[in-house]
Structures are given as structure tokens and as C-alpha cells.
Amino acid sequence: WKEIKRKRPSISSSLRILIRHKHYLQNRYRHSKYEEDRIRLRSWNILVKKEFQADRQRKWEKFISNVASPSPTSFWQTVKMLNKKKSVDFSALTDSNTIYRPPTDIAKCLERHFTERHSKPILDMTNDLEKDAVDVWKLFSLADIDDIELTSSQSDLKFSVQDIKGAIRSLRSKKSSGFDQVSNVMIKLLPEHYHALLTQAYNDLFRNAQWGKEWKTARTICLNKSENPAPTTDQL
């Protein structure tokens, strides 16, 4: 949240190319002062204005067609865009009349707030998989990290490219994505040469015993949109 994100441009790539060339002609005429450069800049400026007018006209016609569409989905998606509230990237956090500005203080305040709000997930011990996972976590907590790495490196648990392909093939073709913005359809459309990279990554994870309890009990929290640059914890 504290990094400056690149905003998605609202104009097409062809219009950006026209504007870029117009800036080039402006700089050229500013340095040369030639009459032919002035004429070329003027004609190009007229062309850019006409293209922008045509683009606005196309967007308006598309908007009207979506509103007048017999499909309820198209209509409500268009109305939702009109009623969408703008959000502000907050740079501070207010909690009990105290304003936190450093990123570390904001992170600690959010951690404390959401820890009090949400309880830890309860494991279902009647589930054999979760019961086995708890037993494995107990063994990991009692073992030495060097012994774990040595045992994992000598383990015969190895994933092959066929295992990765089978796991991807078994996924349901869902277009919806989670917090990582990756859907099952996107995974299914991965080129085949990525399967070898995934195989190596999974083998490295299990060889280094990177499968702690946090993978099961972690919770992803999405912050609400805020119009206040210094919102309170309750607003998030």
C-alpha cells in the first residue's frame, strides 16, 4: 500500500503513440523554429484532436449500448461503475486519537487490531488430513532445523513434470480469482515449459521444509476502501 502503483491508462495505446509523437514535434519546433516544423506540428495537433473526439464518441456509444442492453449483467456492471466510490491511498492510521505515520507503526497497529477482531481458526480434528498435519507440526517443533533439512534432502519425495501436469489438469475451469489475482483458467493456460519451473520450485520447497503451520492457519484480510488519508482502524 505504501508503494506508488502504476495507474492503468484510460486511453488506448494508439492515442498514446499519437501524443508521444506530438510531444516530439513540439520539442523539435521549440528548438528549430522552422516553418515546416510548425506546419507539421499544427496538422498533427488537429489530427490528435479529431482522434480524441472520435474516441470519446465511441466510448459514449458503447456506454449507451451497455445501458440499453437487454442483459441485466451488462446494465448493472455499467451502473456499478457510475456509482463506484473513489478510494484514497492512506499514509497514516488513527487509533484511539493517536495517529501512526511510520510504516512499521502502522503495520503493528493493524496487526494488533485484526488480532483482537478475528480469532484463530479452529482445526477440525475429526478430519484425518488436519489431524496428520497437527502431528507433523508437533514433530517439526521438537526437531532441530538442521536435522529437518538433512532428512528432507535425503527424502525420496520428488515431484515430476507429469505430477504438475496432472494437478493442473484436475483443476476446475474457474475464472474467479482469489487475493493473488490468479484464477484456475490462468493456471491452465500456462505454457508447458513453465511446468518444469513449477516442478523445480515445489521440490525446492519440500527439500527445505518450507511447509510450516502458517500455511494452514494464516488468514488474508482485505482492507476496505477509504476516502480519508488517515482512516481509523474501524474504517478498515
Image (cartoon, rainbow, N blue to C red):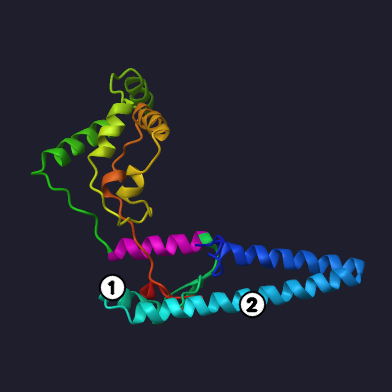
Please check the rendered image and state whether residue 112 is part of the magenta-colored stretch, yes or no: yes
Type of residue at label 2? Answer: Lys
Q: What numbered label is drawn on residue 168?
A: none
The x and y percentages for residue 128 are 11, 38
Q: Which residues are magenta?
A: 104-117
Which residue does the image show at 26% across and 38% down from the upper left? 169
Magenta stretch, overall SS:
helix
In this orientation, does residue 142 appear? no
* Residue 185 falls left or right of residue 14: left
Picture quadrant where residue 117 is located? bottom left
Q: Earlier in the sequence, mark 1 or mark 2?
A: 2
Q: CA distance from mark 1 to mark 2?
A: 33 Å
Label 1, on which residue? 73
Give the percent coordinates (x, y) of residue 164: 30, 32
- Give the left or right position of residue 6, taking residue 60 as reference: right
Q: Hey, what amino acid is under mark 1?
A: Thr
Locate residue 82: give its quadrant: bottom left
Q: Could you tell me which residue is drawn at 34 percent across and 61 percent down?
A: 221
Residue 50 numbered tag: 2
Label 1 or label 2, whichever lies nearer to me, is: 2
Nearer to us in this view, 99 or 3: 3
Packing grade of label 1 (10 A; few <14, some 14-19, many >=20) is few
> Residue 116: percent from the left, percent from the top?
30, 64
Can the viewer see residue 63 in this picture?
Answer: yes
Residue drawn at 32 percent across, 43 percent down: 188
Residue 90 position in % (x across, y down): 50, 71
Q: Is residue 53 left or right of residue 26?
A: left
**In terms of depth relative to the viewer, which is nearer, 76 or 126?**
76
Q: Callout 2 environment at 10 Å: few (<14), some (14 to 19), or many (20+)?
A: few
